[in-house]
Amino acid sequence: MPVVSPILELQRQRALLQLEYEHEREEFRRLTEVMGVGRKVKRGDCWYPLRVGRSYYNSLNQLVLEVMRTDDLEIEHNFEYGRQVVFFRQSGLDGISYYNFTATVSYAEAERMVVVMPDATAVADVQGAEALGVQLSFDETTYRLMFEALDRVSRAKGNRLAELRDLFYNPGHPAKFTFAPMRFPWLNPTQERAVNEVLWAKDVAVVHGPPGTGKTTTLVEAIYETLRRESQVLVCAQSNMAVDWISERLMERGVEVLRVGNPTRVTDKMLAQTYERRYEAHPDYPQLWSLRKALREVRGARRGSDAYHQKVERLKSRITELELRIHNDLFAQARVIACTLAGSASRVLEGMRFATLFIDEAAQALEAACWIAIRKAGRVIFAGDHCQLPPTVKCYEALKGGLGTTLMERIVASNPSCVTLLQVQYRMHDDIMRFSSQWFYNGQVSSDPSVRYRSILDWDIPITWIDTASLDGHEEMVGDGYGRINRAEAQFTLEMLQRYFERVGRQRIIDERIDVGIISPYRAQVQYLRQLVRRSNYFKPLLGQFTVNTVDGFQGQERDVVVISLVRANDEGQIGFLRDLRRMNVAITRARMKLIILGDVATMTRHPFYARLYKYINSLNDGEH
């Protein structure tokens, strides 16, 4: 691998990030001006109409407003902690007027959201409005944090950040401790080796976890063992959902976790671990709340006298003292601080340093986002799979220039000695797993005997590809950039699934809680499939066992039965972003026992990957394996 200049590479990353920033800002402007409210609601980027609830000061002394959606609650929304939003009023069909302030999401669940408001005037304006809506605003904050992180690491000299930068960009010999390996009999040999590599690493280690290989189990063990040597670690991931997942698993091991940010998995257990809830539960909080209330009342009264100023200063001093005491107590009790990569820049973590940073789902994070957290760490442990979902890059020029190349990928290429590939999978029937192993992992992943022949029906073929060429239907575009849909294929998906359920026995599926996932790469197809499933009387008793979502929505999940609707069907053989094979690797590895692919063979198999997959599936059906 040729030697590169880390500074020049970081400057190139910054230029590519600037392209992505400008593209996304322009896209937001275009959508705001052109796209109708109904389309934005369907995309999950807007709630309209909106019901406004109470306003109050939260535990961090921020003025917040509670809002509830009254639109189609079946539509999954994209609002989450830290995202910026803008309120608007609608009059007539197209008359939309936006308020001249932005707010920030503090907490979001399926139908209720709490947003941090700039001031009391903004709250009053919104509370008195009719035909009110809220939509995602362009996220300046995350971009600002990423630009600052790239600038900081570029300027770094003579410190740990500079050392890590130079090591990550060029071939080298990451330093290691040399103590004897520890034994973990409950792990398999590659998992055990991965945990030991983490413990030995002085600079960096990578846990490469293909689908179903127990990456989270391995990472939890590595964190648990690290905490026997260190008092506290920082655990980050790109998404809130990934942070929640690893946090829950750590809590199951009895590890004290402090969750900074808004959990997506809204359970009482998760909420109880958040900084805000723990803050409010602190014994000193009632006194702090009273002092803050008193300060607001004093400021609202007549001011100007010496006595007024002295009273304000006394209250402020006492408030600061209590805030620091509560804050310090919370961090003193926690062994793991868990947050998103962008969340590591939170003011509650200001000035904190950690001996070890763990980044989960590292192959889904932009390099710039990783550097936000790395500045706080002495060494970094990456966990993920660069053969599954990549980071989201919307600008084609930035993607082509390499913005989607992650820091984990760089390290895998430059320092392969610090990478451990987990090689035993515990999810899928061996026939489902084998194609992925051959194409993406050089055939190095094998199936544990406990799952090798798992199936629902005896003598069933685990993978089927049903050619949809005979259907009277083609793909079509829906809306402006909203996505593609293939209505005939969607209808056929449910008919085919119903036939399969009849073979298995619908009552057996209900009794044994056999769960089902329907995956499509296109959001428009997902929305249409959800409507069909909800309207079907046949599937009504099974709705609790059904999940219909995009490939991205299924990352990290698994189901007994998975059906994939590929959508694409055209005379030119165009398959668009299905050429991103990492996305397809996720889709075909979600099923435990039965995988059914629906797609137009003539369209899809012009691409060598799909041609090979189709041939592999036919070999199973012909009994050639």
Image (cartoon, grey):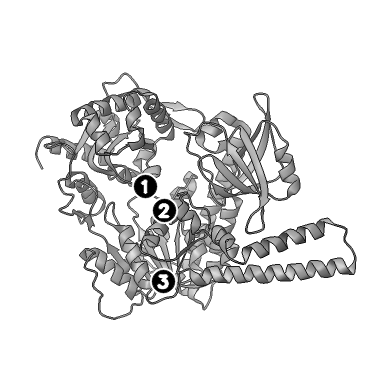
**How many C-alpha atoms fall within 10 Å of the one at disc 1: few (<14), some, or many (≥20)?**
some
| Front residue of this view, candidates 50 and 623 | 50
The percent coordinates of residue 285 (x first, y second) are 62, 63
- Vertical placement of 625 versus 251: above or below? above
Q: From the viewer's perspective, is the residue at label 2 or at label 1 nearer? A: 1
Question: Is residue 362 visible from the viewing direction of this image?
Answer: no
Q: Secondary structure at mark 3?
A: helix
Position of residue 595 in the picture relative to residue 625 (left or right): right
Closer to viewer: mark 3 or mark 2:
2
619 relative position to 466: left or right: left
Q: Residue at x 52, y 60 (%)?
A: 260
Residue 287 visible in image: yes
Q: Amino acid at mark 1?
A: Gln
Which of disc 1 and disc 3 is earlier in sequence? Answer: 3
To which residue does mark 2 refer?
364
Q: Which residue is mark 3?
A: 167
Front residue (pair 269, 206): 269
